[in-house]
Amino acid sequence: MRRIGNTDRIVIIGGGISGLSSAFYLQREAERQGRSVQLTIVDGAEALGGKINTLQRDGFVIEKGPDSFLARKLAMYNLAKELGIEGELTTTNPNAKKTYILHENKLHPMPPGLVLGVPTEIEPFLESELLTEEGKRRALQDLELPPREGMEDESLGGFIVRRVGDEIMKRISEPLLAGIYAGDLHKLSLKATFPQFAQAEREHGSLIRGMQENRKAGAQAGSLPPEAKGGVFLTFTGGLSTMVNALDAALSSADRKLGTKVVEIVKGAEEADARYEVVLENGESLPADYIVMTAPAFNAADLLEPLVDCRELRSIQYVSVANVVMAFDKETFGLDFDGSGFVIPRSEGTSITACTWTSSKWVHTSPGDKVLLRCYVGRAGDEAGAFLPDEELKAAVRADINKTMGITAEPIFTEITRLHHSMPQYPVGHVENIACFRERMDKELPGIWVTGAAFDGVGLPDCIRQGKEGALRLLHNGK
């Protein structure tokens, strides 16, 4: 393992949650080993946090990027404990557990027992008006159909159609699951997105039976953090930027190069006696014994392609989306919510793909006499809405909430966030592709670790887990 003097110089490219968690665990592991490291975080933005961006306004807590994380994925919870901020965690309103799906411009409650779009309680599923009788019969054929032989990857959409039919895929699975990736289920990798589905089929011969068993096992394991209190999601009372601020404070000894981008990575910086030289657009050069690359796949490929084949990174496409948050006076709003929001299939033809009843789902986000809504725009094959001028986008969203919920009240204010090329799409074969890419990197560019949402999970806990894994790998293997 190469070291220069007594200190390893590590450059982290990207100041989002992947980069910050990588830096935190590099620092923590170096301390545990009694090693000296000098961390430098580089990001083209003026502030740390990446897509995490909490706005405090007029008593509202508004997330302009992600709004929460899955409680059962413990990496983020464990990091919160290590940072000493777990006491600021909060879960969803227990009185707002219902979620709806729009079908023929009517909001239908999701049947109890629906897990990731898969029915695990048959009777409520059969009573639902979301599917035709033929669609329900086709879904239940999953209990009799033989499992597929072989372990090769397939598309998520193809798998769902094969097991439970086209109707459940279009009306339930697509709006639910595609919401996580803003993707086209027929182009997303099953193995990279929901490997538990394939495992359920292999082990139980049926997707429905497998998810039933998974649900039972999860209930028995009781693996949710105590702060979840029966909820599925967690966030912080002061917003997700609470974690960014805590990581920023914990990394006080790390250098920061913000507001300037990396333009080149040079192999073998002889003058500095370092493996690499990281060149910034302001002309500065940083010697690096190790590099952690957390930029989006297309940016990472731009920097690495002069040094290594990046075809696998180029195969990862990105989708652009927008969030439109609206605040209302409750007395003029004219509507009470009994749930957390709804998702919308493509067939409904709306501009919005989903709507979160934020002040109902998260009681800390709004003053008691106000209402907060968050609408989502843009998905694979339908990104135009995310690029509409502000006034046109506001008008389109207002028209949709009037059509779907009858809301005519004038917002107190509206916040628009555009997240261009923000949602990575894992193609079929993604897991194998990334394994090949990592093997090539180990041979040709040792000491550079590429990680982030484009690799092994898009959620915040996934990014943190990957950041920790990369940090441990670098400091143990030097690769």
Image (spheres, rainbow, N blue to C red):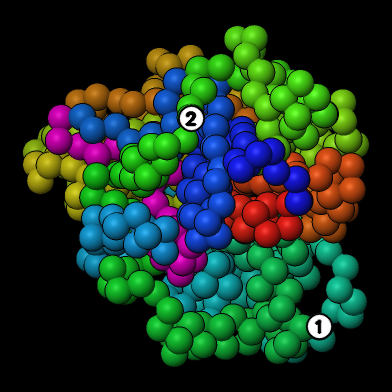
Name the residue type under label 1: Pro
Most extreme residue toward the front is 5
Q: Earlier in the sequence, mark 2 or mark 1?
A: 1
Please name whichever residue, 370 or 105, is drawn nearer the observer in this view of the structure.
370
Judging depth in this view, the residue of 479 and 179 nearest the camera is 479
Taking the spot 24% from the left edge, 44% from the top edge, the residue there is 238
Q: Is residue 318 left or right of residue 64?
A: right
Rendered location of residue 98, percent (x, y): 34, 64
Question: Residue 332: horizontal and vertical position, in percent?
Answer: 13, 35
The residue drawn where x is 49% and y is 22% is 258
Q: Does 143 appear above or below 472? A: below
Image point (88%, 68%), residue name: 152
Mark 2 in CB contact with mark 1 (< 8 angstroms): no
Boundaries of the magenta span: 58-77
For this rendering, which residue is in front, 362 or 466? 466
Residue 330 relative to residue 439: left or right: left
Helix, strand or loop under label 1: loop
Q: Is residue 344 visible?
A: no
According to the picture, the residue beneath numbered tag 2 turns out to be 255
**Counting other residues with Cα less than 10 Å from the Cα at mark 2, is it few (<14), some (14-19), or many (20 or more)?**
few
- The residue identified by callout 1 is 147
- Residue 433 pos. (x, y %): 85, 52
